[in-house]
Image (tube, coloured by chain):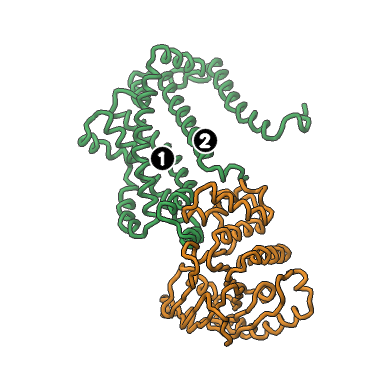
Amino acid sequence: MELPIRAKIAISDLSKSFRTRRGETHALRGINLAIGASEFLCIVGPSGCGKTTLLRILAGLETQTSGTVTIAQDDPSRPLNSMVFQDHSLFPWLTVLDNAAFGLEMRGVPRTQRYEKSRALLDSVGLTRFSDYYPHQLSGGMKQRVSLVRAFVTDPEVLLMDEPFAALDAQNKVLLQDELLRIWEASRKTVVYITHSIEEALALGDRIVVMTSSPGQLKETIPVEFPRPRNVFELRARPEFGIISARIWEILELEVLKAREAQP
Amino acid sequence: MTWSKGALSLENRERLLSIASPVALLLVWQLMSWAGLLDPRFIPSPIGIGKAAYAMLLSGELLQNIWVSLIRILAGFVIGAVPGILIGLAMGVSRWVRAAVDPLVAALFPIPKISLLPLIMLYLGIGEASKIALVALGVVFLVLINAMAGVLAIDPIHFDVAKNYGAPRYKLWTRVVIPGALPMIFVGMRLGIGVAFIVIVAAEFVAARSGIGYLIWTSWETLRIENMFVGIITITVLGVLTTLLLREIERLAMPWRRERA
């Protein structure tokens, strides 16, 4: 495997197993991965392959059974990582503005300052008008825009995304992908993006890592050479887009079938 | 006669109906009394009850007893609800606290609180303290159990978000645990206030020289049925008013639930 020039995230020999009633279940086994600074890495895999577990270990929400994870911290005043979660992660009891400013608030940023920063970013995703709304008054797409703002506004070393658009309809998904790339272009932060959609990985990533079904291991790494900045709509219309996604599907298909067989 | 559409909104028609039906009931009741269909020794007429209430208001008897009961309920409610909320939230947050306290709650909650009155009077005397303590006992478990359930009902993803964004401990409480559990805390308090009324009336029946319960009981002993009805109606009105007050506080405390259908 070709190593990026400088690893922002280094994962070595990472394994994770859970103890269940039926014995030990291996969620992840022997993961080795280096992710470069400013790289947008997408991880695809069948459901239950442990990709979310991998991301949660990176986020510090779970601990590995063995192996190491290192995230290079260039600026100690910035958070190491911020995560964009799946849907329904906004706090129903906070307004859009307070949700967006949540990460900054936790880091002790004074109110005026955190509101100012959050407002600016909310503005860039067209949500200024909704600052005082509560999440239940927003559409799914708007909620995930707020989630993006909440993560980006903290200016973390790396961004971790756990299928943030999985619950959206097809049109909104593409819109949000495009929006995500637009915000991301401004900072080009290192991103680890989990998805089960090949098209999504192809539209967003610099590199796609395919995972095997349980225990989750890295199966193959595919570089994505579409130039940046990208336009997701335009990209999806290209003939190469369909050809490459068909090729990745061939790699993934076997794992999906295996995962299906493994279901009790 | 037909209702023209739009003359009254659906909501207003509903409101009108909910006022009209009790008024109609009172009217029927009064008419039946006049017609001699109801024996005034057992069921006094609405006007008779009104007259009795007016006399009790003038003598100060009614307000005095309302005041005494309300103070007992309020003091007991606060003394029960505050620790109930705190312990309940702690149980929701920490599995260790839950494991330690849960068996005690399971054992104590089902005890009919009124059955403890003699014991409490033995410890706290026959004064106000024993009534307030009894109300507090009635309230504390309901609030505690609901506050705990409220924390446990918070979507785990919210705790993940707080952890990922590095929430300090006090922010975890003020931004996640308390607002997340608030709807259930209010459910507990609404149930608690209902129990407080039941408990205080029962306690005043047997062990008080004042209060609405005492008023009802002495009216029974002297067979002043009208006064008895005044007492029952008073306690009903107080119950409705406190419930409405609590609902208004709830509305103010949880602005994010206001526009919900």
Residue B8 position within the rendered picture, expressed as x and y whole percent measured from the top left: 72, 30
Judged by depth in the image, the label closer to the viewer, 1 or 2, is 2
Residue A49 position within the rendered picture, expressed as x and y whole percent measured from the top left: 55, 78
The residue closer to the viewer here, B216 or B7, is B7
Same chain under badges 1 and 2? The reply is yes
Q: Find residue B95 and report its image quarter.
A: bottom left
Whether residue B149 appears in this view of the structure is no
- Residue drawn at (45%, 45%), measured in percent from left and top? B185
Left or right side of A71 for A87:
right
Left or right side of B42 for B210:
left
Q: Find residue A160 and report its image quarter.
A: bottom right
The residue closer to the viewer here, B4 or A44, is A44
Looking at the image, is mark 1 or mark 2 earlier in the sequence? Answer: 1
Determine whether label 1 and label 2 are within 8 Å by CB: no
Name the secondary structure under disc 2.
helix
Which mark is drawn over residue B192? Answer: 1
Q: Find residue A144 and report its image quarter.
A: bottom right
Assess disc 2: are there few (<14), some (14-19) or many (≥20) residues with their C-alpha within 10 Å of its C-alpha: few
User: Which residue type does callout 2 highlight?
Assistant: Glu
The colour assigned to chain B within the rendered structure: green
User: Which residue type does callout 1 highlight?
Assistant: Gly
Report which residue position mark 2 lands on: B248
- The chain to which mark 2 is attached is B
Whether residue A43 appears in this view of the structure is yes
- Residue drawn at (43%, 18%), measured in percent from left and top? B226
Mark 1 and mark 2: Cα distance apart in space:
16 Å
Q: Which chain corresponds to the colour orange?
A: A
- The chain to which mark 1 is attached is B
Residue A148 position within the rendered picture, expressed as x and y whole percent measured from the top left: 60, 61
